[in-house]
Amino acid sequence: MATGVVAVIIFAITLLLSLFILELTGRVYIARRSLSMPVDFKSLHGDLMHQYDPDLGWALRPDISLLMPYKVSTNSLGLRNQELRKEEGHMRILALGDSRTFGDGVNDEETWAYQLEQRLNEHQPGRFEVINAGVCGWNALQGLWYLQKQGLQFKPHLVICAFGVNEWALVEPPAIWDGLNGRTCRDGGAWRPWCGAL
């Protein structure tokens, strides 16, 4: 009987120790991942691809054409897309996401959003428009804010969300945003979205 109790105690201690090590490993991974986010907040003003956005933190700059060594271009709305067509007569799909949707490391024509539009239009030419609203480093919360702020204005028939490892990163404290625009977190009596997430 005493041997069984000792075995249960040893098992419980081993289980707790294993869970502690797993938790610690996860926290170290998340901390390292957060440090390697694709947007360097300290040099955002000098960033050729991103710009400060008061609601989203950062967004793509409009009307850019960069070679880095892959081609990145944006339209007048700051989307990695051609200029949007008139709304009538076609099905509009909005692709929201992080670097995978943006197409980090590939040319404009190699993003999955562009490829999807091409494949859909093979069967019905000109019927589909896929809007690439992916931004490196964004998480699903920023995607939701973008959808509410701008995405729904495009009147999409379908919204595809594709977010990944950025969901493990912490939402940065508002002090980071303060250094970018000189505002405090509480602006005009209303809390900025980033403050509300703390």
Image (tube, helix red, strand yellow):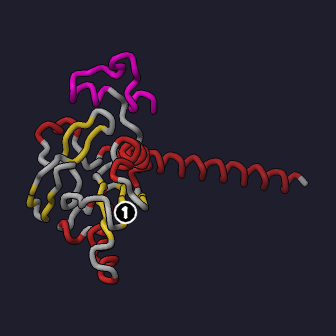
Q: At label 1, which amino acid type do we have?
A: Ile
Residue drawn at point x = 21 percent, y = 49 percent: 77
Give the x, y percent position of residue 107.
17, 67
Instruction: Please state which of residues 18 and 86 is positioned toward the viewer in this rendering.
Output: 86
Q: How many marks?
A: 1
Q: Position of residue 121 (x, y in %)?
A: 30, 77
- Determine if residue 30 is in view: no
On screen, 109 above or below 145?
below
Residue beneath the point at 30% across and 55% down: 133
Along the line of sight, the residue nearer the viewer: 153 or 67 = 153
Q: Residues within 10 Å of mark 1 (few under 14, many from 20)?
A: many
Stretch of the chain drawn in magenta: 175-198
For image coordinates 16% across by 50% down, the residue present is: 76
| Left or right for 156, reference 70 | right
Quadrant of the rendering where the N terminus is positioned? bottom right
Q: Position of residue 42 (x, y in %)?
A: 19, 35
Q: Nearer the viewer, residue 138 or 41?
A: 138
Q: Is residue 94 magenta?
A: no
Q: Identify which residue is drawn at 40% across, 55% down.
A: 165
Q: Is residue 120 visible?
A: yes
Question: What x and y, as percent, mark residue 190?
Answer: 40, 21
Residue 184 in which image quadrant: top left
Left or right: where 38 falls relative to 66: right
Tell me where residue 104 sits by quadrant: bottom left
Residue under numbered circle 1: 93
Q: Quadrant of the C terminus?
A: top left
